């Protein structure tokens, strides 16, 4: 079962909030964490992963904060999930570079690989802009 954990949920909430900012403005991570009742340290870790993946930028200082590194239409759910959790896989053997010791005799491999393709295609279909317009 595909499960969106709290890290991805909070990361999406943060990115959606950043997508609503006017040009040139940024969002204080601490203020966002307080507003949403999210642990600041937990959110800071998530934001760090998003930054490392090139999805957000951060500036320091009194007027510092976070902002999107690319337009919301260019950030897809797949990119966001993988920035936070790493390569997505329905099972370990469908993740990039993973090899299963039972690969030659595994009867469920074709099903999981097809499911993997379908889920990745679906996650790649939805951009942050699409998600912002769904409510």
Image: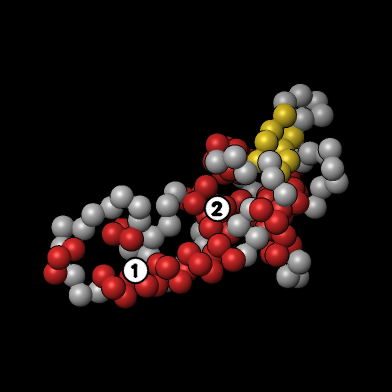
Percent position of residue 47, x then y = 61, 41
**Residue 46 as seen in the image, left or right of residue 61:** left
The residue at which mark 1 appears reads as 113
**Residue 130 as seen in the image, left or right of residue 52:** right
Quadrant occupied by the N terminus: bottom left
Percent position of residue 130, x then y = 70, 65
Disc number for residue 79: 2
Front residue of 69 and 43? 69
- Residue 89 to residue 30: above or below: below
Would you say residue 36 is visible in this rendering?
A: no
Q: Who comes first in sequence, dot 1 or dot 2?
A: 2
- Residue 112 to residue 28: above or below: below
Quarter of the view holding residue 23: top right
Percent position of residue 65, x then y = 74, 35
Quick one: SS at disc 2? helix
**How many residues crowd around disc 1 within 10 Å: few (fewer than 14), some, or many (20 or more)?**
some
> Residue at the spot x=68%, y=41% of the render?
69
């Amino acid at each position: 079962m595909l499960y969106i954990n709290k890290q991805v949920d909070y990361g999406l909430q943060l990115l959606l909030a950043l997508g609503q900012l006017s040009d040139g403005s940024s969002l204080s991570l601490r203020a966002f964490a307080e507003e949403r009742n999210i642990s600041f340290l937990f959110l800071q870790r998530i934001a760090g992963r998003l930054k490392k993946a090139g999805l957000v930028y951060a500036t320091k200082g009194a007027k510092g904060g976070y902002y999107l590194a690319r337009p919301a239409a260019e950030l897809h759910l797949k990119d966001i999930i993988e920035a936070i959790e790493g390569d997505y896989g329905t099972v370990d053997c469908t993740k990039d570079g993973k090899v299963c010791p039972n690969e030659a005799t595994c009867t469920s491999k074709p099903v999981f690989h097809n499911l993997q393709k379908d889920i990745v295609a679906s996650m790649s279909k939805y951009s942050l802009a699409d998600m912002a317009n769904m409510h």
